[in-house]
């Protein structure tokens, strides 16, 4: 059987939980979060105006 989806997202989420992602702060709403993306988006307000902390 062949399936799609699920696999990579779980692996990426585990890496973020383990602290492998970089920490960012949203300049719009102040939310802090970890991300593995080169161009992170705030998960709280969807703003692209974030800074690495």
Image (cartoon, rainbow, N blue to C red):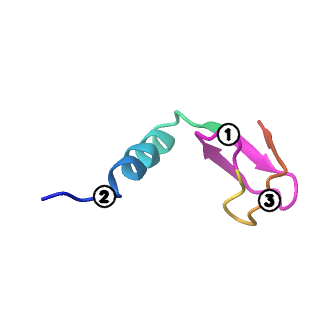
Residue 7, x across and y down, in percent: 33, 51
Q: Which mark is residue 47?
A: 3
Q: Which mark is residue 23?
A: 1
User: What is the distance, in whole Å, between disc 3 and disc 1 at their CAs?
Assistant: 15 Å
Q: Is residue 3 left or right of residue 44?
A: left
On the rendered image, what quadrant is the C terminus found in? top right
Q: Residue at x 38, y 51 (%)?
A: 10
Q: Which residues are magenta?
A: 23-40
Q: Is residue 37 left or right of residue 3?
A: right
Mark 1 vs mark 2: in front: 2
User: What is the distance, in whole Å, between disc 1 and disc 2 at their CAs?
Assistant: 30 Å
Q: Earlier in the sequence, mark 2 or mark 3?
A: 2
Neighbour class for label 2 at 10 Å: few (<14), some, many (≥20)? few
Q: Which residue is mark 2?
A: 4
Residue occupying the far front of the picture: 2
Q: Is residue 36 left or right of residue 15?
A: right
Q: Is residue 2 left or right of residue 28?
A: left
Q: Residue at x 51, y 42 (%)?
A: 16
Tag 3, which secondary structure?
Answer: loop
Viewer-proximal residue among 9 and 4:
4
Which of the 4 image quadrants contains residue 12?
Answer: top left
Residue 27, x across and y down, in percent: 87, 52
Neighbour class for label 3 at 10 Å: few (<14), some, many (≥20)? some
Mark 2 vs mark 3: in front: 2
């Amino acid at each position: 059987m062949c399936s799609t989806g699920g696999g990579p997202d779980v692996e990426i989420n585990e890496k973020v939980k383990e602290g492998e992602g970089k920490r960012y702060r949203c300049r719009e709403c102040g939310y802090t979060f970890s991300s593995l993306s080169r161009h992170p988006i705030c998960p709280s307000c969807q703003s692209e105006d974030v800074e690495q902390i």
